[in-house]
């Protein structure tokens, strides 16, 4: 009789079969630690189901969720999970050695911890010569510790939760929400305890182009604009847009002292990318004041290329 499962790993997928295969290989390597777990891949409407990517990966089931958004895909996986601990990882992430082991060990050792977030770092194409976007994202994207310790949520690209807690809090939101932020803050508001686990580390590629990076920030800006209501709120939004435009000068100290990147070249590249994306965000914030077309940024963000 096989040992009971200790973890269910849920992977949403949309049109990234090559990245998915690399993710699954990194998960398969976790079996070296001798901890039994299952993998549930939930396709979210790809042009083709990722059958080849899932081939020869043991203890894996492939399902499909047609409701758009990674939240609904994760919800389906959570509902099918057979273990008492759920772990979520994005299909373009690479789980580092000991990922499964560290999650199971902490949740077993600390029964008072209800959910956790692991560390997320950028997977560099060429570690000797990072691109401007890779240098920028190494500093400013995926601030996993801050998400957990300051804001009370964990990024769903690297998150684990007890199944009973997930059921109590309820499902992730749909495509129109920032599902990981909203769900995590809903959980911590109910009194569930969250922890940061740096040993549970994944690597994820940076955006492939500035257009991809801008599209990601468009979604964040649009979500925040939906909260604007009334004159005072609008004035705060205007002030915030001006602060964003002027912020690169303030951020220069952080860029040139951080240990997330090294070397003058990489720091200069990070600063150049930061300046460009902050100007883009500021323009988008100002544009929404006059046009208010936030919905198109929110509802189409993960349908690109589908």
Image (tube, rainbow, N blue to C red):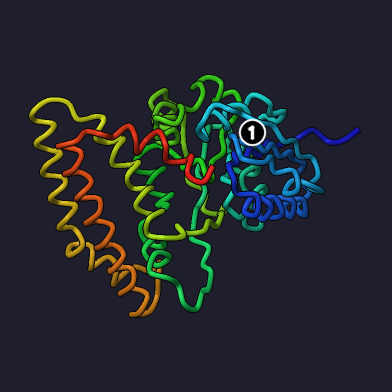
Location of residue 218 by image quarter: top left
Q: Is residue 157 left or right of residue 186?
A: right
| Image coordinates for residue 68, horizontal then vertical, percent | 51, 30
Residue under numbered circle 1: 85
Q: Is residue 35 left or right of residue 304?
A: right
Location of the N terminus (image quadrant): top right
Location of residue 65 by image quarter: top right
Foreground of the two, 237 or 121? 237
Q: Specify the farthest residue to the right.
A: 1
As drawn, 248 above or below 212 = below
Foreground of the two, 65 or 124? 65
Tell me the SS state at disc 1. strand
Foreground of the two, 173 or 300? 300
| Image coordinates for residue 160, horizontal then vertical, percent | 57, 38
- Residue at 43% x, 65% y: name it: 134
| Image coordinates for residue 255, horizontal then vertical, percent | 29, 68
Q: Can residue 248 be seen from the camera position used here?
A: yes
Mark 1, other Cα within 10 Å: few <14 / some 14–19 / many ≥20 = many
As drawn, 168 above or below 30 = above
- Residue at 42% x, 23% y: name it: 190
């Amino acid at each position: 009789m096989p040992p009971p499962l200790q973890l269910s790993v849920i992977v949403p997928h949309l049109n990234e079969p090559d990245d998915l295969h690399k993710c699954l290989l990194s998960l398969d390597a976790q079996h070296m630690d001798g901890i039994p777990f299952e993998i549930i891949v939930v396709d979210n409407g790809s042009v083709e189901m990722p059958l080849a990517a899932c081939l020869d990966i043991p203890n894996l089931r492939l399902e499909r969720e047609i409701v758009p958004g990674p939240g609904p895909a994760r919800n389906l996986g959570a509902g099918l999970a057979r273990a008492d601990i759920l772990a979520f990882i994005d299909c373009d992430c690479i789980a580092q050695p000991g990922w499964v082991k560290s999650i199971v060990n902490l949740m077993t050792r600390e029964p008072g911890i209800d959910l956790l977030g692991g560390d997320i770092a950028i997977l560099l194409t060429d570690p000797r010569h990072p691109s401007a976007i890779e240098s920028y994202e190494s500093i400013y994207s995926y601030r996993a510790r801050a998400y957990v310790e300051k804001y009370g949520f964990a990024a769903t690209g690297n998150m684990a939760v007890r199944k009973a807690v997930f059921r109590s809090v309820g499902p992730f939101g749909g495509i129109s929400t920032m599902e990981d932020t909203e769900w995590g803050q809903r959980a911590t508001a109910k009194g569930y305890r969250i922890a940061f686990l740096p040993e549970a580390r994944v690597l994820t590629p940076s955006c492939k182009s500035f257009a991809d990076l801008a599209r990601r920030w468009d979604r964040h800006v649009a979500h925040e604009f939906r909260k604007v209501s009334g004159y005072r709120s609008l004035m705060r939004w205007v002030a915030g847009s001006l602060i964003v435009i002027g912020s690169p000068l303030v951020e220069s100290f952080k860029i040139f002292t951080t240990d997330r990147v090294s070397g003058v070249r990489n720091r200069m590249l990070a600063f150049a990318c930061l300046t460009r994306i902050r100007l883009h965000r500021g323009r988008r914030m100002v544009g929404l004041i006059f046009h208010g077309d936030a919905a198109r940024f929110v509802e189409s963000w993960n349908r690109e290329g589908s």
